[in-house]
Image (tube, rainbow, N blue to C red):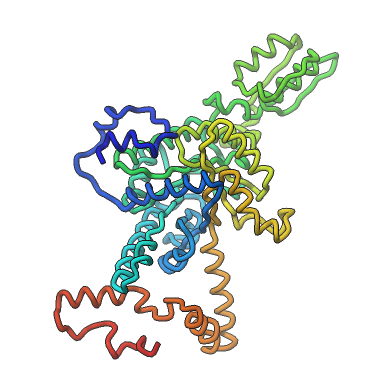
Amino acid sequence: MSLAEFFNHSRFKNISRDYTLNELVRLVPDLQHQSVSNELSQRLYFQLQQLFQQQKFTSTFGCLDPVQLIEMSKYVDTIYVSGWQCASAVTQEPGPDLADYPMDTVPRKVDQLVKAQVLHNRKYKLQYRPVDAINIFKPIIADGDTGHGGITAVMKLTKLFIEAGASGIHLEDQKAGTKKCGHMGGKVLVSTQEHVNRLKAARLQADIMRCPLVIIARSDAESGKYIDSNIDPHDHPFIMGRLKYSFEGQDYVSEYTIPEAIIEIVEKVSKVTLEKKKLFGNKTEMMNYFQKYVHVPFEYDWECLRSPEGYYRTRNGTEYATHRCLKYGKYADLLWMETSKPKYSQAEYYANEIHSKYPEMMLAYNLSPSFNWDNADMTDEEIGEYMTKIGTLGFVWQFITLAGFHVNGYHISQFAKGFQENGMLEYVKEVQRRERESGNELLTHQKWSGAGVIDYVNSLITRNGVTNINDDNSTETQF
């Protein structure tokens, strides 16, 4: 496919680019690295599009290692690689998810998993299992955090992901350097335009590499209480300030956003009823309202509410996250609002607002283990139906970010306890017999890990050699 055909492909019909094909040409090298990402990204996009048209969804969860990868690939359509899991279980110095690990940490995990896919693809081909060989290449969607810096950092990170083989990445609108897990406190947002620039940078890098990378834009504004600047007028309606005014001999002091301040003072002083939805303006527009309707002394100051670090306070919530995502929609394939609880009414509001502007926009949803699902005002039946229900709203990609972490920890804990109590019988009863009864390939772990591939390679190099892994002396012949 030529660059022109790629650039104008129908796959990008809903994506805006602020550069032309002629401008892009000058950045595309004549020869460059080709990755499985180029094919799998295309497959992922059209798979999600088909699900969206059918009001269906696909689900997955965070994968820790090649064992989890291969075993979960039998049942899921996509693989998720979580920055949180990498922070707590992969990095050389584990810790909470602050994205303070080296920026190639998550790409390196993707690279490891893609290489595992390649190995097991070869293994299944040698076992004459063509369906398994093909299906092992499940598209990987990875956590790009905040992009780990400015525009060039975002582009370099995107390049690392594509070279590693990721089919999709998500980028969130937190500030690099103060980034927290989406379910921690103390999150600081960047301006809406800064995050738009990150999304544009990621797309530009993918275009340079002729990769139809799936890009997911995430907003943390539902719970993020601070923003690093008031430079973007798009954020003005949600930045908090202190309103002071006098009316009928009484002084009033309250903390409001601009629309809230307008409604408070205009309706009280001038008895004019205003519609809040029409007041998503900037500070200049607020002053115009005041000059038109208000004839009492007043002050509005958003500097006095800044944090010791200099961050502005925001009126965080669903409305703000939606407001920001509506700006991201031109540059993203999917939109994701990080939420604090699993709440259908919130998901419905978000989906309706997004689709009022972008009818074909696909949505993503974090089925987070940080939620106390037993405290979410849902019955077991409602919990079981939740994914299907929000799937009809357009949430085509749903995922449990940290399931690999929790499943790993829980089952290891149970086995370790039983092993101390029952000795080898615990392993035989709870692992080996269960593997045999279920037909799990891990029972013969040498074969599972690709020993047959090595034997085949050796047979091509040293004909009639006697150093085969799977010869009669292998203990796996016992099975």
Using the image as rendered, state which of residue 51 and residue 329 is in the foreground. 51
Residue at image position (64%, 53%) is 386
Task: Give coordinates of residue 382: x percent, y percent.
Answer: 70, 56
Instruction: Indicate whether 437 appears above or below 141.
Output: below
Residue at image position (64%, 35%) is 319
Q: Indicate left or right for 48 with 128 as reference.
A: right
Using the image as rendered, state which of residue 74 and residue 165 is in the foreground. 74
Using the image as rendered, state which of residue 423 and residue 93 is in the foreground. 423
Residue at image position (48%, 60%) is 76
Q: Indicate left or right for 338 with 163 as reference.
A: right
Task: Give coordinates of residue 457: x percent, y percent.
Answer: 21, 73
Where does the C terminus fall, quadrant-wise?
bottom left
Quarter residue 353 falls in: top right
Where does the N terminus fall, quadrant-wise?
top left
Task: Give coordinates of residue 373: x percent, y percent.
Answer: 67, 57
Instruction: Indicate whether 420 appears above or below 329.
Output: below
What is the total number of numbered labels drawn onto the structure image? 0
Using the image as rendered, state which of residue 451 and residue 45 is in the foreground. 45
* Residue 310 visible in the snapshot: no
Residue at image position (55%, 56%) is 400
Quarter residue 138 falls in: bottom left
Q: Indicate left or right for 332 with 27 as reference.
A: right
Task: Give coordinates of residue 260: x percent, y percent.
Answer: 71, 25
Q: Indicate left or right for 405 with 465 as reference.
A: right
* Residue 329 visible in the snapshot: yes
